[in-house]
Image (cartoon, rainbow, N blue to C red):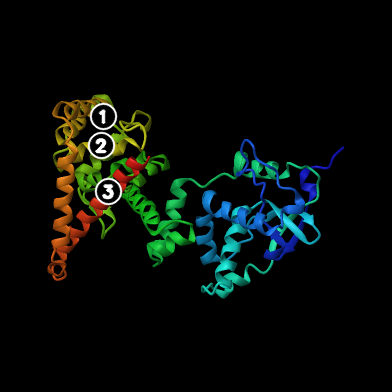
Amino acid sequence: MDSIISEQLSPIELSIDQIYLDPNNPRFVHDGWIHILDDAIDDDDVRNDTFKRMRERIHRVDQVLMNMEINGYLPIDRVIVREFKEGKFVVLEGNRRITAAKILLHRDESGDAVNESVLASLNAIPCLQYTGHDENAAWVFQGIRHITGIRAWSAFNKAKLLSERREEGQTLTEVGKVFGLSGRGAGQWIRGYKAFRQAKDDTDYGQVMDERAYPFFQELFGRSNPPLREWLGWNEVEFRCDNELNFIEFLSWLYPPPQDAEDDIEFNGDDDEHVPGDWNDRVIGNVQLLRKISSLIRNNPEKFDQFRDTRDLDTAVAGAKEQEMAYGREPAEQLLKSLDDVIKRLEDIPTRRFTGNDAQREALMSKLDTLQCEVDEVIQVMNS
C-alpha cells in the first residue's frame, strides 16, 4: 500500500538560491502546453521566462510582495518543494511567495534599498520536501490549497482588523501595505466598517444587524457611489454619516419593516418610529444594486424619489432608461465640447485662491475626487 501524502513530506530549510520557480505551474498550463523537463528547470532562459510569467500573469503577487516588504518572509505556511537536481529544488506549492522573495533580492542586488531585517528573513526558507513520485504532485498540492482551500476570513473580520490598525495610528497606506492592499483599498474597507459600526451601535437596526450586511457598507465607498455617499452625508473627518434620516432610510432598504408597519413610516421627521425587519426581505438584493441607486441619484432624481416611495428599484431603473431613450443620448460632439470646457476651466483655476479658504478647498477636492472616479469608471467601461 502506498504511503499517504503526509508521510511523503519532510521538513527542510533552503536558501532562496536553491529554490526554483515551477515552469510547469498549473496556472500556466493551457492547451498545447509543452512540458519543461527537469534538466531544463535551472536553464537561465527558462528561469527568466518563469519569473516573468509569475510577475506579469499571476494574480496577487504584488499583494504578497507588499506584505513581505513590511513583515519579511513569514513561515506561517511552509513552501512545498521537490528536488529535481542535487541541491536544487522546484516549488510545488508557494510560487507567489518565492516570487516575491526573489523580487526583493533582485532589488537589493540592483542597489534599491531593502530593509536588512526583511533580507535576513530570506536567508533560510522553511520548506516541506516532497519525496514521493507523483508527476502531478504540483496539481495535487495546489488543488488541496486552492480548490478545497483554506477557509478565508470574512470581509467583516478583515475590515475590523484593518480598522483597529488604523486606530493605532497607522496611515491608510501603512495599514494597507501590511495586508497587500493599496491605501485607497484599505480606506474603502475601513470606511465601510465605520459606517457599519454606526448602524450597529447608534440605531435601532443594531438589534437585528449582523455581519452579512457589511459588504453593503463597504460598497458605499466604491468608485461608483459618490452620489449615494453624498446623500447619506458622509463625514470624512468623523468617518460617519451625518444625514441621520437618510442613513436610517438606507438601513430600511436592508431590513425593511413589516408590511403592516411600513405604511405608517415616513422618513421626514425626527420622531419617526422605525421597525427593523427581516434581512431576507431586503429591498437591495446584492451590493451591485447600490451602483444603480447612485446612478439614479446622479442622473434622474425623480426616479430615485420613485424608488424611495415604492421600494421597487427595477421599475425605477427601467423608467429611467425609457426616459433616457426618449430624450436621446447626448451627441458625441456636445460631450467633447463639454469636456473641452471642463479641461479649460481646470487649467484656468487660480489654485492659490483655495489655499487660504479651507471650505472652498475641501469642496474643490471633493468635486475633483468625484470627477476622477467618474473618469476612471468611463475609461474602464470603454476599455472592456
Q: Which residue is mark 3?
A: 375
Relative image position of residue 324 (x, y in whole percent): 18, 30
Q: Is residue 54 left or right of residue 236?
A: right
Count of numbered circles in the view: 3
| Above or below, comparing residue 284 to residue 241 in the picture | above
Relative image position of residue 101 (x, y in whole percent): 60, 62
Distance in Å between CA atoms under marks 1 and 3: 26 Å
Q: Is residue 265 visible?
A: no
Question: SS class of the residue under badge 2?
Answer: helix
Label 2 sits on what residue type?
Ile
| Above or below, comparing residue 307 to residue 161 in the picture | above
Q: Which residue is mark 2?
A: 293
Please identify, in this view, whether the residue under mark 1 or under mark 3 is nearer the observer: 3
Place residue 329 in its image quadrant: top left
Q: Quick check: marks 1 and 2 in contact, CB under 8 Å?
A: yes
Distance in Å between CA atoms under marks 2 and 3: 19 Å
Distance in Å between CA atoms under marks 1 and 2: 8 Å
The first of marks 2 and 3 along the sequence is: 2
Q: Is residue 332 left or right of residue 99?
A: left
Q: Which residue is mark 1?
A: 313
Label 1 sits on what residue type?
Leu
In terms of depth relative to the viewer, which is nearer, 198 or 64?
A: 64
Residue depicted at 64% across the width and 43% down the height: 26
